[in-house]
Structures are given as structure tokens and as C-alpha cells.
Image: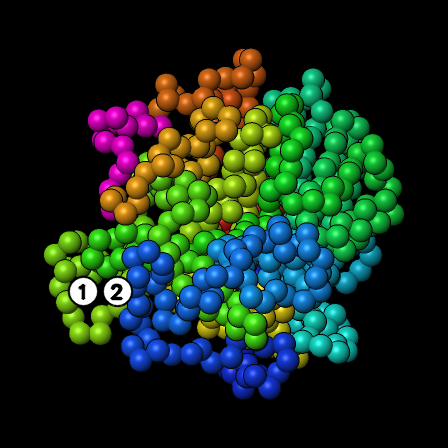
């Protein structure tokens, strides 16, 4: 049903059915041919302590040059690479963001509600949610009526910003302006940074709302968009200029947030709405006997076939994330039979038992993002909203949904390694661990996240803490252990910068506080602004 799609994953189309017949070598855009198998059981990974865990990797594959997503983007090739190997996060980032063949550069289209620039659905005219769902489905059909010459077809997905415009954007504007008026106006400018602004609808709704409802604040507003997609950056500039918002008020920077280098020393707000679900993750698996972690990599052979394999942790970002997780005493997601040494010994002795744990996807690019905030936005307040859970994920802990749209039907895949550029890859966000990690990183001096990056992971169980309870104690999150206030300036929350603390809210809680719910109420009393997106949370 439509509601299940809206309530479960905002990018899923309405109809779902099994279309595995489409995923075959007969389709030129499907690159994942049936994997080669060794004589071993498919779950039994061969191990050479100096090379890798893998069922299929060869010395030739391991001789391929190791590349990063940034290096592939700089090459300027219109075709995905062959005869290379890379970390899983670089594969994901290249598949989504490569400027020549990436999903967001080539395939993705954001659904827009009907009407003028700042108009959307007239919710008060809909009889009930079924009536509203039918209207959205019709809009999908209209947007999808484009003939494609290659690949699975036009990729259309929706966001709450677009479905509920302008009311969703106005709710976020009301949240931010309330704190700004209380803490900073008229002594500081109202500075907002939005990451990945899509069609520019959220920026447009916020700025239009401020211009009408808070003209004095609008005159002090400096809105900056950081957009990795060149086509979307052009759309944002043109749309905002048409609406009368000049460069004095809003600027669009075409670049990745991970390459941002300008320090904002004034108080500001950072918006990340449905952005971090596409942040690349790494994958780790653990030796079932010792729980030593191994990092996931993938080789691409000369035929474009993917060969995943695992090696000992050598990547600094993966090492840093695992060390920080131990410091925060967050446990890895392991099956119950690997959580004690006795059970691990029994399990490892079973015939045909895998010698690696199931895969766990870790948000390493999220850690990079938090470091950027710490370093370049020292007085920011973060408003982040995204999915906390997703249906139809591939196997593994914190695993992504890998999906594509074929003739208007969204089809989930069973593997991560698919043809680059034709598939959306989105991850759920664990908001409570994210909040802890965010708070801890902001407590540290600039450029320092953890002091345990050089730990030997082969000798340390992920179930252990890198700090003793005595060193952390009851004061781990106490004011005395937080960052000192910066020149006596208070944060947007009213506390000294070192005292800032974020909270996690459900989508309905946040909208119930800040939205004008009468504008999105249907004639029978239902309110899709509250009823949909049950799997979305807000960090603020």
C-alpha cells in the first residue's frame, strides 16, 4: 500500500512486486553476473593471514591499484572503472556521487508537488489518506513519463520537503527562528548552512517564510547551500533567483561537505534533511574465534565483475571509528552466538560454520562529517533528520537498501555490488549512538576525536572498552568533561558552547511542536504530516 511506502521509506514507489527477472546478464545496465564459487561452502571464507578473507579473490585481483572515490571522480571517465580495487565506502561513494556516471549526477529525479514554486497539495481538499495517496501516485506517473534510452529508467523519489511544501519547510524555519530570536537577534546574523538541498525547495520555503513573517530577521539572513551535484546546484540557483532571493541572502556552493575548508566562526545552524542516509559506510566482519575485525574491500576485474574480500584493518578512518565506538562503550552488532568466548568456540567447531561474522556496516563517512562540523563550524547548532529504519535491506547489521525503479516499480536488490549509477544506496541512521558520538566529538579540541587510533585491533575485542570504568566513571558526560566555552559565547541552546546537548525526536513530535498542522489536515481529520514517515527521527 502507499502508506506503507511513505511510512517505511520515503524513496520507495507505490507498487512493489518481485521482478528478479529484470536482474540478469541480458540487461546491459545490470553488471552483477552470478558470482563464481570455490569448492568451499559459500559461507566459508578462505583465509591467508597476510592477504585476505575471500572465496574468489586471486593474486591478480590483489595486484590491481587501490583507488578512492575522489581519484575516480578526478579521472573524468564516463564509464565505471575496471581492474581496480577499493574500500567498500569508496565503491558506494563512487556509485552515488561520481560526477560522470553517479546516481545523483545521472539518474535521480526528485518528485515535486503540483502548483507554483511555493505551492503544493491542497490537503484540506482531500477526503482521506487514500485520496491523498492517489494524488501522489498520479504525480509519480506524470513525472515518470520520460522515455529512457539506457538503464532501468528514470529514478524518482520523494521527500517530506516536497510532499508537504511549503508547510514542512515552514516548520523547520519556525524551529530555527525561534531560537535565533531568543539567543542572537539583533546582535548576530542569522546564518544557515543546508547540505544537499535537492531542488532547493526547503531553502525556498524557509526564505519565503522569513521574508513574510519575520522581515527583520530576513534582512539579517545569510543562507548557504553546500551541494555536491552540479545539476541540482544549477536548479537551486535558478529557482531561488526567480523567487527574488539575491546573492546577498543566499549562495550555492557546488562542492562536497567533505571538502569544505572555510571556517564559520559566528553562531550558525546546519541543516541536514535526508542527506546522511546516502553517506557511504564501510563494512567490517569479525573473526568468529577472536573477534578481530576485518575491513571490506572490492576488486573490479577486467569484465566489470565485483569480487569482495576482507583484510586486516589498515584504513585510518575505519580504525578511528572502531576506537571511538569502544571509547563510547557502544557494542558492535553481533549475533547472540558470538557474544561470549564459550559460544564462539562451540560455533567455530561446527561443520561448515562460517569463519567470519555476518557483515556490519559502520558509518565512517558520518564520522568524517562530524569532524568537519567540529573543525569548521565550532559554534553551530545541528538539525539532522533522516530514516532510523528501512525495509528491504540487504543482509547484515545496519545494512542499506539497494534499489532501483523499473517502469515505475521500485525493486530492492539483494547485494550491494551493482552497476554504479543506476541504484540508490541508502542506510538507516542509529540516532542515539549518533547523538553520543556527536556530543563526544564536539567536546574534543579541534582536530582530535579519539586518542586510540593506533590500537592493535588484532589484539582487542570489539566487546571491550578502550577506557576503564574508573577513567570514565559517572562523569563521562558531565559538564566538567565538556569543551570549555569559546570566549564566553553561548550556543543556540542557551548553554555555554561546552555545555551543548542535543536530543532525538520522532518526526511526529518535531512537527507537532513547530508545524501549522491545520494546513496538512485532511477532511476526515487525518494528518499525513504526522501519520507518514514513522521511521524518521530528528536530532536537534
As displayed, is residue 225 above or below residue 287?
Answer: above
Which quarter of the rendered picture does the N terminus lie within?
bottom right
Identify which residue is drawn at 20% across, 61% down: 337
Mark 1 lies on a secondary structure that is helix
Mark 2 lies on a secondary structure that is loop
In the picture, the disc for residue 60 is none
Residue 339's quadrant in the figure?
bottom left
Q: Nearer the viewer, residue 387 or 181?
A: 387
Tag 1: Cα neighbours inside 10 Å, few (<14), some, or many (≥20)? Answer: some
Q: Nearer the viewer, residue 339 or 436?
A: 339
Segment tinted magenta in the rendering: 461-477
Is 133 placed left or right of 242 in the picture?
Answer: left
Marks 2 and 1, how far apart at CA: 7 Å
Queried whether the magenta region covers residue 463, the answer comes back as yes
Identify which residue is drawn at 37% across, 49% down: 313
Q: Tell me residue 167's x, y (percent).
A: 68, 49
As displayed, is residue 334 above or below residue 475?
Answer: below
Q: Tell me residue 417's x, y (percent).
A: 51, 68
Tag 2: Cα neighbours inside 10 Å, few (<14), some, or many (≥20)? Answer: many
Q: Is residue 81 visible?
A: yes
| Residue located beneath label 1 in the image | 348
Q: Tell me residue 71's x, y (percent).
A: 62, 52
In the picture, the disc for residue 355 is 2
Residue found at the very far top of the displayed protein: 487
Identify which residue is drawn at 56% across, 72% down: 302
Precedes in sequence: disc 2 or disc 1: 1
Asked whether the residues under the numbered discs 2 and 1 touch, taking CB atoms below 8 Å apart as contact, a structural biologist would say yes
Q: Tell me residue 471's x, y (percent).
A: 25, 26
Is 160 placed left or right of 38 in the picture?
Answer: right
Total numbered labels: 2
Residue 225's quadrant in the figure?
top right
Q: Is residue 206 visible?
A: no
Amino acid at each position: 500500500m502507499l502508506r506503507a511506502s511513505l511510512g517505511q521509506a520515503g524513496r520507495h514507489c507505490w507498487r512493489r512486486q518481485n521482478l528478479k527477472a529484470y536482474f540478469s546478464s541480458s540487461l546491459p545496465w545490470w553488471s552483477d553476473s552470478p558470482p563464481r564459487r570455490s569448492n568451499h561452502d559459500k559461507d566459508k571464507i578462505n583465509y591467508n593471514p597476510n592477504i585476505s578473507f575471500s572465496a574468489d579473490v586471486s593474486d591478480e585481483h590483489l595486484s590491481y591499484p587501490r583507488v578512492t572515490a575522489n581519484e575516480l571522480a578526478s579521472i573524468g571517465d564516463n564509464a565505471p572503472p575496471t581492474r581496480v580495487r577499493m574500500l567498500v565506502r569508496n565503491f558506494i561513494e563512487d556509485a552515488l556521487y561520481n560526477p560522470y556516471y553517479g546516481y545523483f549526477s545521472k539518474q535521480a529525479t526528485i518528485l515535486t508537488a503540483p502548483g507554483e514554486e511555493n505551492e503544493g497539495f491542497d490537503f484540506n481538499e482531500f477526503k482521506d489518506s487514500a485520496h491523498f495517496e492517489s494524488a501522489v501516485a498520479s504525480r509519480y506517473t506524470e513525472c515518470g513519463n520520460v522515455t529512457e534510452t539506457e538503464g532501468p529508467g528514470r529514478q524518482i523519489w520523494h521527500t517530506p520537503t516536497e510532499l508537504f511544501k511549503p508547510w514542512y519547510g515552514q516548520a523547520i524555519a519556525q524551529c530555527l527562528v525561534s531560537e535565533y530570536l531568543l539567543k542572537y537577534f539583533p546582535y548576530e546574523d542569522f546564518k544557515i548552512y543546508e547540505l544537499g538541498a535537492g531542488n532547493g525547495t526547503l531553502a525556498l520555503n524557509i526564505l519565503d517564510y522569513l521574508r513574510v513573517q519575520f522581515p527583520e530577521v530576513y534582512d539579517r539572513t545569510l543562507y548557504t547551500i553546500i551541494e555536491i551535484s552540479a545539476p541540482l546546484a544549477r536548479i537551486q540557483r535558478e529557482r531561488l533567483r526567480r523567487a527574488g532571493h539575491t546573492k546577498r541572502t543566499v549562495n550555492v556552493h557546488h562542492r562536497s561537505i567533505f571538502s569544505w575548508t572555510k571556517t564559520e566562526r559566528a553562531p550558525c545552524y546546519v541543516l541536514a534533511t535526508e542527506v546522511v542516509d546516502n553517506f557511504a559506510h564501510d563494512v567490517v566482519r569479525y573473526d568468529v574465534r577472536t573477534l578481530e575485525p576485518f575491513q571490506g574491500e572490492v576488486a573490479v576485474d577486467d569484465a566489470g565483475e565485483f569480487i569482495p574480500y576482507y583484510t586486516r584493518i589498515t584504513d585510518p578512518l575505519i580504525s578511528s571509528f572502531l576506537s571511538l565506538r569502544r571509547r563510547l562503550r557502544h557494542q558492535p552488532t553481533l549475533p547472540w552466538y558470538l557474544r561470549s568466548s564459550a559460544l564462539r568456540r562451540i560455533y567455530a567447531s561446527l561443520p561448515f560454520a562460517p569463519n567470519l561474522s555476518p557483515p556490519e556496516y559502520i558509518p565512517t563517512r558520518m564520522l568524517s562529517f562530524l569532524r568537519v562540523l567540529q573543525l569548521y563550524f565550532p559554534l553551530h547548532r545541528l538539525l539532522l533528520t533522516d530514516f532510523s529504519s528501512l525495509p528491504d535491506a540487504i543482509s547484515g547489521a545496519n545494512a542499506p537498501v539497494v534499489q532501483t525503479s523499473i517502469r515505475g516499480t521500485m525493486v530492492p536488490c539483494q547485494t550491494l555490488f551493482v552497476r554504479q549509477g543506476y541504484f540508490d544506496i541508502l542506510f538507516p541512521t542509529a540516532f542515539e549512538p549518533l547523538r553520543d558520538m556527536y556530543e563526544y566529538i564536539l567536546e574534543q579540541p579541534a582536530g582530535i576525536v579519539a586518542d586510540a587510533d593506533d590500537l592493535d585491533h588484532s589484539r582487542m575485542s570489539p566487546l571491550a572498552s578502550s577506557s576503564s570504568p574508573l577513567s570514565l566513571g559517572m562523569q563521562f558526560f558531565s559538564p566538567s568533561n565538556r569543551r570549555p566555552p569559546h570566549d564566553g559565547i553561548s550556543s543556540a541552546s542557551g548553554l555555554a558552547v561546552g555545555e551543548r546537548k542535543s536530543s532525538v525526536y520522532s518526526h511526529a513530535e518535531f512537527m507537532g511542536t513547530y508545524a501549522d498542522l491545520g494546513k496538512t489536515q485532511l477532511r476526515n481529520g487525518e494528518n499525513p504530516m504526522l501519520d507518514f514517515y514513522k521511521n524518521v527521527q530528528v536530532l536537534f
